[in-house]
Image (tube, helix red, strand yellow):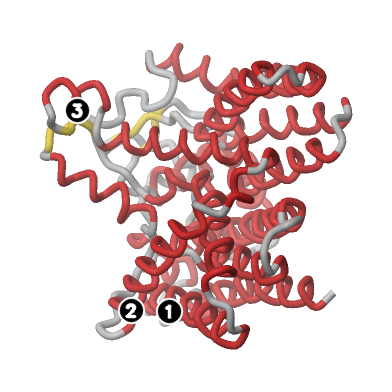
Amino acid sequence: MKEDFFAYIIIILAFTIPLILLVNLSFCDLDSDECLLRIEPLMPDFYWHHNIIKYVASHGDFPDYVLGYEDGGESGDSLYGKTKPVLHSPLYYYIAAGVLILSKKFSLNPLLNLHILSLLFTLIANIFFYFFTKKISAGMYKKNRFTISAIALSVFLPINLYMGLAIHNHAFFYAMAMLSLYLFALFNEKNSLFMALAFGIILGVSLLSNLIGITLLVALLIYIAYIIHGREFNEARLLIISLLIGSFIGAFVLARNYILFGEFIWAGLFEPVTRNAFVLLHVLTSYFGGVYGRIPFIFPLAGLASLFVLIVSVFGFFNPLMWKKDLQYIWIIGILTLIFGFNTVCSVFSFFKTFSCTGNIVHGRYFLLANPLLILFFSSGFARFIKNKKIFYFILALICTLYLIDFMYAFF
């Protein structure tokens, strides 16, 4: 189908353009590793994650603390500097450690290959998101346009472009999260035990890949309560199996953090800061957070593109088809993600008690699980709002191009 052809072209472009950029950046007058180290300050927490990978590759086990802001040496185990707790889910770091070991064995560039690993995971995430979008597009107005705009915006969102290059566990997590959404859509088609088991396993793997995975499990618990209220007992029984399997597989991470650090998630990493309520604007702006080149002419246009995306998404919000049953779980995930993001930067309890915001930082990667909901809103609204086919694809291409050009410029 023509729709599939264009979708895969978009997905391949989103993989190959950053790949060419990476390979080009690895060649300069310095050592290839040093060439890439020049761009790492653009990626938050690079040393934190890179030291964990090196530690796992050298020692075979997971560290409790590593240096967070400087290189931890060949084995990542130096603690002479400011350390940060290793509160992350471990699975990505073992995979990345394997890539690091193989790179050294075959005299390849370890940093380049770790970046490519993130690109591969992002590619997988984009493919599964496309499969998911096709599954839920039945009945949507201008179904093909809906699907194409969804995958195009998804792959070129600033946070997704950033995620594809960062040495970080979010790319692997996002791939597992998008696979879980696709499996849930398949489960909705036919409530089978096999799909419930597969869905539960991937939910568990999602939590083993990133602590944000807890959102998927909490959302499923709420969804189960909702369908039990609607007396859909057979579906609820199967999804309870999924929930139990996912919780059993992923519970290790939360238990480890609580035993080592006394907290399930943040591990006392950030000291809460009290600020005025205007800091809530960070919740909105950070959703589009990524890596920006801030080209004088292009960057403001990219900002206007983001504003356009939000406005059109509001239009899509009122599409009755966005409220159909097979999207209810996505709704819950998106709402929980926004609540958790809000609470991170501005504690709900302190806000209603003192009308001030007490919290810490917020970054676009914390909103990854809100991506599908916003993208579906935008695609639904965009397909209904722009009737002319040529104008539709021109605007879509313009938005994606603005994001991509400003992103690439940051590395030069």
The kind of residue tagged 1 is Leu
Which structural element holds mark 3?
Answer: helix
Left or right of residue 48, residue 233 in this image: right
Q: Which badge, 3 or 2, is on the more N-terminal residue?
A: 2
Q: Measured from the top left, where is residue 215 in percent x and y?
A: 53, 31
* Residue 394 drawn above or below residue 316: below
Residue drawn at the location 32% of the way across and 52% of the way down: 284
Question: Gap in Å between the C-alphas at discs 2 and 1?
Answer: 7 Å
Front residue (pair 89, 246): 246
Front residue (pair 159, 262): 159
* Residue 173 drawn above or below residue 103: above
Judging by the rendered image, the residue that carries numbered circle 1 is: 402
Dots 3, 1 in contact, CB < 8 A: no
Identify the image quadrant of the C terminus: bottom left
Question: Gap in Å between the C-alphas at discs 3 and 1?
Answer: 37 Å
Judging by the rendered image, the residue that carries numbered circle 2 is: 301
- Frontmost of labels 3 and 1 is 3
Which structural element holds mark 2?
Answer: helix
* Residue 87 drawn above or below residue 264: below
